[in-house]
Each structure stands twice: as C-alpha cells, then as structure tokens.
Amino acid sequence: MLHLRSPRLLGLLGRYGSKSDFDNAIQELRAAFSDPHAVSTEAGTLLAHGFSMNDYHPGVPHTVVVFANSTEDVVQVVKIANKYKLPVVPFSGGTSLEGNFRAFPGGSICVSLAGMDNILEIHEADGDLVCQAGARWMDINAALKEKGIPLFFPLDPGPDATIGGMISTGCSGTNAVRYGTARAEWFLNVTVVLPSGEVIKTRRRARKSSAGFDLTKLFIGAEGTLGIVTEATLRLAPLLDTTVAICQFPTAARAVEAVREVLTSGAVLQCVELVDPDFIRASNLHGVSTRKYPEQDSIFFKFQGSDAIMKETSRQVRQIVQKYGATGWHLASNKQEASDLWDDRKNGLYTSLALIPGARGWSTDVCVPMSRLPEIIAETQLDIKEAGITSTIVGHVGQGNFHTLLLFRDDKELEVVRGLVHRMVERALALDGTCTGEHGVGLGKRKYLYEELGVGTVDLMKAIKKTIDPHNLFNPGKLYPDDISDQGKKL
Amino acid sequence: MLHLRSPRLLGLLGRYGSKSDFDNAIQELRAAFSDPHAVSTEAGTLLAHGFSMNDYHPGVPHTVVVFANSTEDVVQVVKIANKYKLPVVPFSGGTSLEGNFRAFPGGSICVSLAGMDNILEIHEADGDLVCQAGARWMDINAALKEKGIPLFFPLDPGPDATIGGMISTGCSGTNAVRYGTARAEWFLNVTVVLPSGEVIKTRRRARKSSAGFDLTKLFIGAEGTLGIVTEATLRLAPLLDTTVAICQFPTAARAVEAVREVLTSGAVLQCVELVDPDFIRASNLHGVSTRKYPEQDSIFFKFQGSDAIMKETSRQVRQIVQKYGATGWHLASNKQEASDLWDDRKNGLYTSLALIPGARGWSTDVCVPMSRLPEIIAETQLDIKEAGITSTIVGHVGQGNFHTLLLFRDDKELEVVRGLVHRMVERALALDGTCTGEHGVGLGKRKYLYEELGVGTVDLMKAIKKTIDPHNLFNPGKLYPDDISDQGKKL
C-alpha cells in the first residue's frame, strides 16, 4: 500500500493521518456499516475506484472504498476521515477524463455514490425531479420516458455519467447550444456533505431565486474539493420531437462561419456538431447508419419542435449553409434514420478508436471565443498530422468548444500525444480561451490554471477551499496547483 | 451626520473607523482624485446615493460619495476604506427594490460606478461584448442596434438597471422563460475589486469553461458584499423578430395551467407574462395601447423567430390556451401594435401607480414551484382584498415567480402593506419557494434567509464572506442577518 512516500512529500501534503490512522479508520468504518460489503479493501476494488482507463495520468489504488447508500452514510465516512485527517475522494460514474477521481498518492478513502442512484421525487407539474448523486442522466431520461412524462434532463455528457459527477465536473454536451451547461440553471439545488460532516441544502425548489450567494454554483465544477454532493433537484425541459440533418463543407472554417449565421438567424436548433473528415471516415467504417458520407468537414444539425417548425427550420438552415459552400444536405427521412445518424455522432469515441485496432485514445477539449475556432482547429489538425498521429475531431461549434481524440499504440506515441494535448491548450490560452470547456481540471489540466486565470483568481479559489476544508481532506491535489504544486506535474 | 449611534450598536457593528477616520479618509480621497467633483460630501448627493424611493426600509445618508471612472479609481477608494476600516457601498443604477445600496447607519463611503458606463469592446463574431459596470442594459441594446449588429443582451429587469447592479442582484426579467436569469451563462466573466483592493478577473472570454470553481457566479447575487464588479463580459443572443399576443382566462389558475401546456409543447416563446384584472384596468386607463382589454386575468405572449415560425407558434399556442377557456385571443397585427402591447406590460409600474393619484407603491416578488403559483396568487389576492389595499399583480409564470405592486397613501396603509408583503413571503416559504425571485435580499428580505435556507447554508455564506472580507467592509448589514442580526429588523 502506498502511503506518504517521502518526508518531503509528507511536509508538502500537510499533516494527513498515518498508516495506523488508516487502519483505525477502516476498523471504525466496518463497525459503522452493518453491510459487510460496504467497506472494501479488496485490491481490485481499490484500483478500479482510484484508477481510470480514460486518462493517462499516473495512478495508485485507494486505501479503502466505502459504498454509501445515503447522505447519512457519506456523513459517517466524512466524520471518520475527519477524525483521522484522511483524504476522501468521491466516486460515482467513473467516466471523467482528467483524473478527477484518482486516488491520493498518500492514501485515500474513496466514497462511492454509485449505488445512490434513485430518483426520489418527480414533480411533473413543476418540471423538476429530485435524485441521488449516483443517478445516471440516461437512466433518468429513460425512467421519465417509461412513465410517459414528456420531460427530459438536457445535459448530455458521456453515456454513463452520473448527476454527482456531472455537477462536480461542470459538464455539458451536445445539447448545450440550446440548453446551456451544468453552470446554467439545471440544478435547482444540491444537498452537500461538507468536509466538517455537516449537511447543507443550497437552495429550495423554486425555479429561480435571488436570495443570497449562489451556493449551488459553488459546488458545480468543484470536483468534490468543497463538498460531496449527495442529492440534487434537477430542472427538466419539455421533451420535443427532433430530427437530424447533415451536410459537408469545403473547410472547417466555412462550416463555423455557416453555423454563426445559422445561430444568428434564430433557427430552432437543439444541437450543432462539427466533425472532421477522419471522424466521418470512422463512422463510415464502423457506424450504425448504413448511409455513407463524403469524408469532409461536416455538420450534424439537430432540430426540435413541431413538424411544421422543424420543416421550416430545415428550409431556413439549408438556405444559409449553401451560401457557405455546403453540399450533400441530407435531412433524415424518418425517426429511425434520425436516431441512427445521431448515434453515429454520439458513438464517435468507439468508432474512432476502431480506426486503429488495439489503439487507445486520449480525449481532450478546449474552448475559445467562437471566431477563433477555425484557426485553432486548423493549427491543431496540422500539428497532429505532422506528429503522425491518427485522430478525430468533434466540435460543439455553438460554444467554440472542440475535442480531439488522439490515438496511440505504445508509450512512445503516448508521449507524442501528451505533447499535442499540451500545445492544444497553449493555443487555446493564447486565444483568450480555456484549458477545458467541459472535462474539468482534475490532475490533467491543473498546471494551466495560473496561466489561464491569474494568481489572484486561483488564490481566491484556494482561500475559499481553505475556509470550507481547512485540513484539505476533500479530493486533495486536484483542480489547481495547491500546496503540493511543485509535485503537481509528476502526479 | 449619522455615525455609530450607540455604544451597543458600535459593539455589534464591529470595529469600524471613527468620525475622525472618515475625515482623514475624505482628505485622502480628495488628494487621490484630481477631479474636484469626484469626491462629494454635499448633503443632497449623500442622501440621493444612500436612500431610495423604491423601498420602505429606513435610510440614512452616506458620509461621502466618490464618483469612479475606472477600476483603478475603485481600487483607490477600497484601499483608503481598508486603511481606516470604513464600510463601502457600491452604487450604479439605483433601481433596486430591497434597500440593496442603502447607506450604512454607522457611516459609509459610497462608490458610484454610474459614470463607468462605457462599452469597451464588441466582438460581433464571438457574440459577446465587454463593458463597464455602470452601463445600462437598455443603452447596450440601443448601441448594438445603432451599429446594425443583430445581437442583444437578453436580461431585462427595470429600465435603468446597470450591468453591475444586475450582476449583484442576480436579476432576471420577462425574457427569463427563454433566456434564463443572471445566474445562467450571460456573464462570461467579471472584473472585481476585492475588499483587499486586489483586482481579479474571474474567467476568460470563452463561452464556457470547466476550469475550476465558478467564481463568476460567486459575485452574481452577492450584492456587492464580496467584491465590487467594475467590468463584465456579456454573452449576447441573436436579435430576432418578435410579436405579441394577448388573451384572457376565467381564472389565474386556468392561465397557469395553460402556460404549463404551452411550455411543454415546445412552442417558441420569448416571454409569457400573467397579469391580473387590476393590471388590465390600469393599462386600459393609462396604457399606450389604444386597444382596451377585458378586465380579467390575462396572458401576454411574446413569440420570436421568422414570420413562418411565429405564425406556426401563434397557431399552436392559441389552440392550447382555448382548451383552458381562454377568450379574446389577439395577435398584434403589426410591429407597432406589438411594441405598444408590450409597452403596456413593461410600463405596469407606472400605469398601476396611476390607479390612485399621489399614491406610492411597494413592489415585491416571491417565487414558488410552478404548480403552486395559482394557490399563492389566489391567497395573496384574497389577503390584499381583505386588507382593503389596491394592487396589481404580474407573474413570470414560466418560473413560478410573481410580483405585487401594493399601493398606499399614508403611513397607516404602509404598515398594512408591510404586513401583506411579510405574509406573501411566508406563504412562498411554506410552498418550498423563495423570499425573492429576482429583487435580491438587501435589507428587506434578509430576515427570511435562515428560515429559507437553514443555518448551515447561511453560515457557509458568512464563512465565505469572512474569508474574502474579514473586516466586513463591503456593503455590511445586507444579504443575510449578520453579526448585527438583532438589529436587522430595525434597520
């Protein structure tokens, strides 16, 4: 078991508990939880909860994993962690991409909220629901559909993402062009266990309130460093009919210009997704849609509303994109085709990985002011090509946000990919952009925070953290370079 | 000049500077600002900046008013305030309704940002602009229109509201049903002078970011208690054609039910505003529209988009509302009529006040889960009627938010009105609602914060406040009951 690895690290990390403190804590945890499976020190479990196949930052196993079933369970864990001054890392979906839930090198208690996946209340007439943090957004939408409730939760990050992770990452997804991100107003309130063990609820269930600081937002994007979200009230949106269209452009730059005019026209869009020729190549090879598309920079549009509105929107959008050299306009002729087309966009991770059998992929994202998207995509594409790496690119064009999935077969290529990711971030920062549009900071992006935000802004984050978590127990070492900043790049 | 009024109050207020500290500070301010009009101790100016005709909480004049022209000017003021430990209250539009910018009873420096009203950069291709905190939203939209830029800023509170005040109040307005509130994603970043005098910018200009805590949101709704916002980057929305329709309902409850179905249908709405029979009566008497309307509970709809989409939406909405007994459906036949109709809605404050010549009005708002709106409106209407008070009601139905404007002629009626406001809040809290949907807390609503949010949540606000403003210099005595809570109800 890895504990504080050197006296130097010990000093830098702060005064966390020792190996025997962990032993005592585990004993107390076992005593506190009647279910014998609630507290695990089984090697596979420790690794699975502290390590991720989704990122390429060094990782170690947790010291113990506790499976919580309720807010009170989380409180128990936090109180014991507090008693022995042990780091606590929350886990739920395990889908994040920047090492956000990685185990702490000096040893850590993982509290898993994966089992806390219940929908507690549905208020159809109010357009909201209350659920536990481990609930998956896809399961929530499936449950609403099954009950015949014509509402849905519109934040759509990766398929297995949970509400707690989505809140903590400040996620978004393809629907953001219409519905905004996790930082908009989809979370009406959150119930949070603070590092002290105290439980608070940030707000009531009204759709809006100007009663004081926006404490809900304080926990959105905080990656579990300020509190562990155990429940949330989600605002829901009307579930509308949708359809999908695709067309090709001579260049990504022309596609972005076209989207700008489409957005300005007020066309009723749900999504606008740019994909590059390699993405289309991957879809043509491995996608669900039987139709094959020209391997060019392309846009997937999703329209929403009544048939009449979708028809009018399609007419309007088609007219605009043609001015920018779009070709091959294809509107899905029925619901099944629309669904297949959209699946091809959403399954990009899998179809792209299949481009090189056995390859792994590094997925990263940045976001820039929209007008700078063409140049950063062009420069990144050139950089990737010169590096000899296979990749696919998707862009949430409506926000100036784009992702690369960079494939690699071995450690040598991994290092080439690491360099590409770094240069992509530096390019975004040079264009008044951000090192991460929707994946969060975790371990992977924290070294950029000072450059992106400035010392005063990061220091304000740290001051708030110190107030709420004076012993730095909650997910230490994530989000920004902290007291162990000089170790940050090695972690 | 009013300074610390009693030894008891002095102790409760904390160790603010004395009268001679104010004198020294004023001298230093005069030396720091070369413009002789920048620092004023003129009685009318002190009162005008510390007192408001918009609310009925006791008020006193400031000790000094400083007119800032830049972030650096604000820093100067804050540094001097810090040196002498003097309260600082920011002022810009002066339109807030809950005493949010009232002078501090023990003496305060008002820093006016009203002159900081410049648009600094317009990025049309990115859909954003950078402006100073004193810029008015209406002026910003007028400037964009004049330049032929087809974008607008969609938050629309009271006419003279400024960006700094809108941020600090966590405002919204009639457009919130389509665009959300100040707590959504319209402020991409803010530049803030902290109580230490340090200046930070919370984020860069990308449309979204998941890089760390959402510090922008920390200042939205903080009412100047954590920092003074001096500049902001605003996200803009496409400026679309709009039109307006109105119809009448048998009851407010039926109107709310109809709106619920309209929202669920995905109709392309920009606004949905409920008004009560008294509001219509006031409009019929004093409005700009020449058309007279039946004095019933009514809904104003604003549609947006291309002619084809508005026509289709109108058809769709009309069909729905008729199921709920709506009568008198009238869609504006041209732009002028639409504009006049909408002016009748937006001018409600003035037409309502005209119902009793010479009367004053107390405007207040609460917000509840949408399904509870009919009952709280009905109970409030009954309460108002039984109290013998003339009033008008408007509701931002899409959020469960409604306002009453309660008219009174003398101090006796003022006390009756005060009781009505209090009971309206208590009713909202009993229905899982909030004491304020969009007016903020200021002095008027702070006594409800503990009941609404719980001790732990308010204490977390206080802990953050103490970290950022350890001497409680920034707008003390607002937002929540603080160390002077036992004085709170008297202030």
Image (spheres, coloured by chain):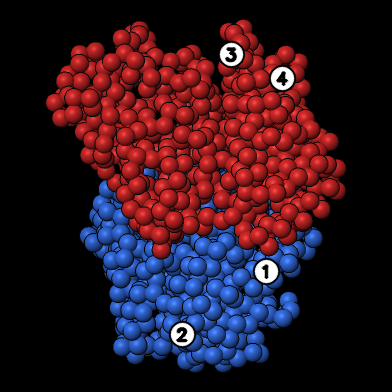
Chain colours: A red, B blue
Query: Looking at the image, do the residues carrying marks 2 and 4 touch, with CB atoms under 8 Å apart?
Result: no
Which amino acid, mark 3? Gly
**Element type at mark 1:** helix
Q: Amino acid at mark 1?
A: Glu
Q: Name the element at disc 2.
A: loop
How far apart are labels 3 and 4 at the CA level? 20 Å
Chain ID of residue with mark 1 = B
Viewport quadrant of the N terminus of chain B: bottom left
Q: Name the quarter where the C terminus of chain B is drawn.
A: bottom left
Q: Residue at x 34, y 39 (%)?
A: A117
Which chain letter matches label 4?
A
Does the residue at mark 1 contact the one at mark 3 (Cβ under 8 Å)? no
Is residue A368 shown left or right of residue A148? Answer: right
Name the chain letter of the residue that bears numbered label 3.
Answer: A
Q: Which residue is mark 2?
A: B250
Which residue position holds label 1? B312
Amino acid residing under circle 2:
Pro
Tell me the tag on residue A12.
none
Q: Secondary structure at mark 4?
A: helix
Q: CA distance from mark 2 to mark 4?
A: 65 Å
Which of the two discs, 3 and 4, labels the residue nearer the N terminus?
3
Identify the residue at image location x=79%, y=45%.
A329
Q: CA distance from mark 4 to mark 1?
A: 47 Å
Task: Pinpoint residue A253: horizontal percent, then vertical percent.
Answer: 79, 37
In three-dimensional space, the C-alpha distance between marks 1 and 3, rounded to whole angstroms, equals 52 Å
**Labels 4 and 1 positioned on one and the same chain:** no
**Number of residues whose C-alpha sits closer than 10 Å to that of mark 1, classed few (under 14), some (14–19) or many (20 or more):** some
Instruction: From the image, tell me which residue sits under label 3.
Output: A358
Which residue is under mark 4? A384
**Is disc 2 in the same subunit as disc 3?**
no
